[in-house]
Each structure stands twice: as structure tokens, then as C-alpha cells.
């Protein structure tokens, strides 16, 4: 059994145009996409997750966590409401295959908090997704009620960590800053997105922090000895805190989830630590189950 703890809806209407342009075209360096924006929209056209579910079935993925991104000032509140309703409809169509984490920019203030509460108590969403590089700090006072509600119901908080697109405010997602916030709120469960492989420095993670390995695909062919040494130490030390995340649809223009999972397992084994069945099962399911079983709503 596999649980994918980091995925997104592959639908172009849920992304800002700037994000699509910079990530999917410029960052991936795909010349064909640069020439044919229409092709990109065809790829990002799975509004009810039918293609994703087919990929999940092939890859033996039992459940996937879909993360809503709130692009802040780039989308208005009506658009965000529609994105939430779309995810709610996916949950109704595939109730046993998905969990939804609500994405909110705290600068929306009380209206944003009310939407978050509605998503939890009416839509059945199960967590919070934060993306500080869009322009806010995790110390924003508007986040306090979000953290308090998450603490009350053991709702996990997924936070983007490390660099994002060059045009964004990447200093807000520095891992050391995220660790400080996790220590400030020890009753909350934090998941640092991408931190399971983004380990360029030695950080002592507090016990309420989990890490996902979404984006590890970028290291297949570029890992230096130093990076592999850091990964080996990191995964060995924090094995019971690391989660598999595919980051669907970000790396899947030419491959499916099943192929990606095979490649990730091979890459983990290439790190030359004891890639035992227990270690692999921790990353791909057991650690995720611990988080999900603790949710109180």
C-alpha cells in the first residue's frame, strides 16, 4: 500500500497563469511547451482526477493528499471559492481515494479563516497547506487561529520549504525559519514539503515535524557525492518522519506515477544505506498512516 502525501489537481484553472508560465514552461525547460501553450492546457485538464486515479490504480496508491494552492493576490476570493468547491466535488466522486488540504493565504484575514473552517466542517477537508513564498511569513499574526484550530483537531499543516520559483519570496520558506515556527507551536503537526531531500544544512528537526520527499525526481541524475551523503544521513536519521510525495502533476509530462515510484525506490537504494522493507514501508505508507490516524475530525 502506498499513500501519496503531496499532489495537486492537474487542472490549469487552479493555477495562476504566472505560475504555469514560470514552473511548467521556464523551469522545466521544455521547448515543445514553450512553442505550444495549448498542449500544456491539454495536459493540465483533469478537473475530476480521473486520469490521476487511473495512475494511482496502476501504481498501487491507495490514497492521495491533494493540496490546494492559494496564489494570494493573483486570484480573487470568488475564484478561490470555486477551487474549493471543485475539490469538494472530487472528494464526493472519489471519497475513499483522496484527502484534501485547504490552501489559504493568511492575508485574506477573517474571510480566509472562515473559508478554512467551512472546508473542514462542511467539505470534510483534513489539513492546511501554506505556501509562504507567495508573500507572507509564518509569523503572520493572522495564522494564529489557523494553528489553533489545527491543534484542536490534530489537522496536519503542510508548509512549502526551500526555494520555489525565482520570482517568489523564497526567504519566507527557509527551513530554519520553519523549524522555529514548529518549535513555537509544539502541539501542531507540521509537514515540510520537499524537506525530505532538501538537506543542504544540518538542522535538528523537532519531534512535531514530518518531511516529504516530493521533488526528489530532480536529483536522479544530478546528485553529487556530498548530496548523496547528506541524503543518506538525513533519511537514516529521520526515517520515521519522512513521507512519499509525488508532486503530481509537476514531473509527469512523459512518465506515469508507477514509473516514478520505481525510480524513487531505485534512487533510495543507490544511497547505499540499508533500504530495508521497513524503511521503504515507513516512507511510502506507515509514517503517513500515523498522521492520518491522529486526525480527530
Image (cartoon, grey):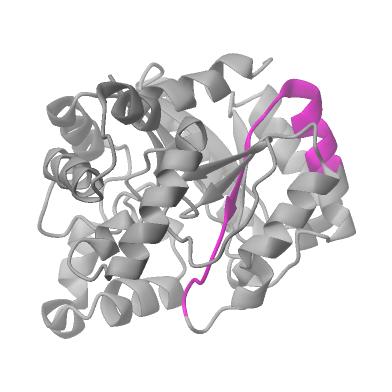
Residue 18 magenta-highlighted:
no
- Quadrant where the C terminus sits is top right
Image-based side of 106 in relation to 285, left or right: right
Image-based side of 99 in relation to 284, left or right: right
Name above or below for residue 26 compared with residue 221. Answer: below
Name above or below for residue 134 compared with residue 50. Answer: below
Which is more toward the observer, 281 or 293? 281
Q: For the point 69% across and 15% down, which residue is it?
A: 296
Q: Quadrant of residue 217?
A: bottom left
Report if residue 18 is visible in the image. Answer: yes
Q: Position of residue 208 (x, y in %)?
A: 68, 35
Which is more toward the observer, 288 or 236? 236
Q: Which residues are magenta?
A: 145-165
Q: For the point 12% across and 29% down, which residue is it?
A: 58
Q: Position of residue 119 (x, y in %)?
A: 65, 33
- Quadrant where the N terminus sits is top left
Report if residue 72 is visible in the image. Answer: no
Q: Position of residue 157 (x, y in %)?
A: 64, 41
Image-based side of 131 in relation to 91, left or right: right
Which is more toward the observer, 118 or 290? 290
Q: How many numbered discs sit on the rendered protein? A: 0
Q: Position of residue 272 (x, y in %)?
A: 23, 46
Q: For the point 59% across and 72% down, which residue is it?
A: 74
Q: For the point 38% across and 16% down, which residue is it?
A: 96
Amino acid at each position: 500500500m502506498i499513500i501519496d502525501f503531496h499532489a495537486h489537481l492537474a487542472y490549469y484553472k487552479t493555477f495562476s497563469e504566472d505560475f504555469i508560465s514560470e514552473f511548467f514552461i521556464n523551469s522545466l525547460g521544455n521547448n515543445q511547451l514553450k512553442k505550444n501553450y495549448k498542449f500544456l492546457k491539454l495536459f493540465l485538464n483533469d478537473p475530476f482526477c480521473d486520469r490521476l486515479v487511473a495512475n494511482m490504480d496502476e501504481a498501487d496508491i491507495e490514497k492521495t493528499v491533494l493540496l490546494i494552492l492559494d496564489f494570494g493576490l493573483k486570484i480573487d476570493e470568488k475564484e478561490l471559492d470555486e477551487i474549493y468547491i471543485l475539490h469538494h466535488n472530487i472528494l464526493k466522486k472519489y471519497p475513499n481515494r483522496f484527502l484534501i488540504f485547504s490552501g489559504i493565504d493568511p492575508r485574506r484575514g477573517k474571510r480566509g479563516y472562515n473559508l478554512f473552517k467551512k472546508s473542514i466542517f462542511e467539505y470534510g477537508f483534513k489539513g492546511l497547506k501554506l505556501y509562504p513564498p507567495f508573500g507572507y511569513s509564518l509569523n503572520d499574526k493572522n495564522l494564529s487561529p489557523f494553528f489553533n484550530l489545527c491543534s484542536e483537531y490534530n489537522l496536519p499543516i503542510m508548509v512549502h520549504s526551500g526555494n520555489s520559483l525565482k520570482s517568489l519570496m523564497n526567504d519566507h520558506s527557509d527551513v530554519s525559519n520553519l523549524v522555529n515556527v514548529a518549535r513555537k507551536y509544539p502541539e501542531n503537526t507540521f509537514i515540510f514539503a520537499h524537506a525530505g531531500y532538501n538537506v543542504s544544512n544540518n538542522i535538528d528537526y523537532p519531534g512535531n515535524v514530518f518531511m516529504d520527499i516530493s521533488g526528489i525526481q530532480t536529483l536522479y541524475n544530478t546528485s553529487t557525492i556530498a548530496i548523496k551523503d547528506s541524503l543518506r544521513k538525513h533519511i537514516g536519521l529521520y526515517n520515521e518522519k519522512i513521507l512519499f510525495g509525488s508532486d503530481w502533476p509537476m514531473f509527469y509530462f512523459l512518465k506515469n506515477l508507477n514509473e516514478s515510484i520505481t525510480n524513487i525506490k531505485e534512487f533510495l537504494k543507490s544511497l547505499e544505506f540499508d533500504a530495508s522493507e521497513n524503511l521503504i514501508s515507513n516512507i511510502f505508507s506507515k509514517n503517513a498512516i500515523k498522521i492520518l490516524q491522529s486526525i480527530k475530525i
